[in-house]
Amino acid sequence: MAAKQKRGYFVKKNRGIIKSSKDRGAWAELCFAMRAMQEGLRPARPWGEPSGYDFLVDCSPQHIFRVQVKSTMHKQNSWYQCTVRTGKAVYKKNAFHFLAALVVPENVWYIVPGKLAWGMSTLGFNPHFSAEKYHPYKEAWHLLRGETPGIIPRIHACAEETPPAGPNESTLNRWRQLRQWLENVPALNRIENQPS
């Protein structure tokens, strides 16, 4: 059968969807590992008994996150319902740092902080509704890199131990020119000369 590529994943024509939820989960985990590597992250699988998470994601020595991977194809009205429990039990607090949820028909990932998913049995996602609760976490791969947009984590600066003796002649000339220009601006003169 001819294979075509649709937004980063290979799907076979006339092949249908993966019927078994266990197989679909394994497929979603493979998709997560591939996408995480494309995002510059290093996913690793834990060995041994199930531990409440599917991957350790290493992006720097300071950040190693536990990630639980889920996927959904179930659409109710315009919302995709994603089951977030293991069997019949919900995940306990601190079971994982992030939930990575793949909305399969839309090929959209949500990287949701664990504290918003612990204790929940389902989460609803609508990739086309910007006011949804989880919209800030749509394709939020930066969270797995330990980044927070809009926040500068650290500023490094240095200063001379002793300040310079004083302004040089060129700086004084610029100040004189600025003062002269300000004195010639009528609007500023009116504001300064108004009685208090």
Image (tube, rainbow, N blue to C red):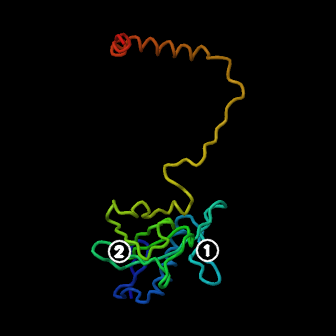
Q: Which residue is drawn at 38% across and 74% down?
A: 6
Q: Nearer the viewer, residue 121 or 181?
A: 121
Task: Estimate the x, y position of residue 138 in percent, counting from the top left.
Answer: 42, 64
Q: In this view, does 186 lie to the left or right of 142?
A: left
The numbered mark at residue 111 is none
Residue in the foreground of this view, choosing between 57 and 33: 57
**At 47% from the left edge and 62% from the top edge, which residue is drawn?**
140
Residue 155, image x, y percentages: 61, 43
Q: In this view, does 3 lie above or below 59?
A: below
Pointer 1 or 2: first along the chain: 1
Q: In this view, does 105 lie to the left or right of 95?
A: left
Q: Which amino acid does label 2 sit on?
A: Tyr
What residue is shown with label 1? 44
Mark 2 Cα shell of 10 Å, populated few (<14), some (14-19), many (≥20): many
How many numbered callouts? 2
* Residue 27 vertical placement versus 101 (above, below): below
